[in-house]
Image: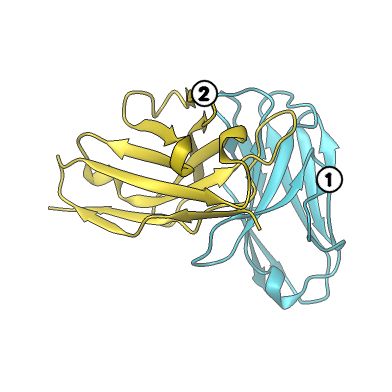
Amino acid sequence: EVQLVQSGAEVKKPGESLKISCQGSGYSFANYWIGWVRQMPGKGLECIGIIYPGDSDTRYSPSFQGQVTISADKSISTAYLQWSSLKASDTAMYYCARHPGGTGVWFDPWGQGTLVTVSS
Amino acid sequence: EIVMTQSPVTLSVSPGERATLSCRASQSVSSNLAWYQQKPGQAPRLLIYGASTRATGIPARFSGSGSGTEFTLTISSLQSEDFAVYYCQQYNNWPPLTFGGGTKVEIK
């Protein structure tokens, strides 16, 4: 069974750094794109960016470029999303999700989500 | 950036009835469109990709249609477990991959 398991909820202060993770299992992690999606409280879905763990090819959505860093370590089947200086507006649920293959990028399955709360 | 617009924002339907959800793209996305279902407190789940191909394990009462800029998700006979928020997502031009704002299907 293909599974993505994300790290646990985080509570941080503005200005702090953070790295959350997403570990894949049940498939060849290096060979499938992984995406990160933000969902702010009570709002819709926004794609942050995607990474191909095999060669770390990363594509960011323009509105998130420079705000976050996506990385992956294929040796431990884990993708990461990190911030160097959090803001209150980064408070959201963050999902990772795998593209199952084929032309284009859609997501299946999704991780369970990591809730990030940034508050002073 | 391609903007995806979903309508209506909220759809009130009785169990057993048909639900029709719409998704419009600001420019053609060909058939490069996916639909997701999200229940409260859960991650989204893929329903449809390629505008009309059901994902593995998705019941046949879910169907997708359309191409270009106009798309429809139809739930032929709503079951209690289908009350949720539904999102469309285009993947024709990316980055960025873009989602619609969602349609909430609620019990009438």
Q: Nearer the viewer, mark 1 or mark 2?
A: 2
Query: What residue is rendered at 56% in x and 34% in y?
Result: A30
Query: What residue is rendered at 65% in x and 48% in y?
Result: A108
| Location of residue B17 by image quarter | bottom right
Give the x, y percent position of residue B61: 85, 63
Give the x, y percent position of residue A90: 30, 44
Give the x, y percent position of residue B83: 66, 69
Chain of the residue displaying label 2: A
Q: Is residue B48 visible?
A: yes
**For residue A56, side relative to residue A32 (left or right):** left
Viewer-proximal residue among A113 and B76: A113
Residue situated furthest left in the rendering: A120
Q: What residue sits right under mark 1 in the picture?
A: B53
What is the three-letter code of the residue carrying label 2?
Asp
Q: What residue sits right under mark 2 in the picture?
A: A55
Query: What residue is rendered at 59% in x and 43% in y?
Result: A98
What is the three-letter code of the residue carrying label 1?
Thr
Viewer-proximal residue among A46 and B57: B57
Q: Colour of chain A?
A: yellow
| Location of residue A114 by image quarter | bottom left
**For residue A92, side relative to residue A87 (left or right):** right
Task: Report whether mark 1 lies on the same chain as mark 2.
Answer: no
At mark 2, the secondary structure is loop
- Distance Cα–Cα, label 1 vs label 2: 30 Å
Viewer-proximal residue among A24 and B48: A24
Query: What residue is rendered at 73% in x and 27% in y?
Result: B29
Count of numbered labels shown in the rendering: 2
Q: Is residue B83 above or below residue A22?
A: below
**Quarter of the image that includes the N terminus of chain A:** bottom right
At mark 1, the secondary structure is strand
Q: Colour of chain B?
A: cyan
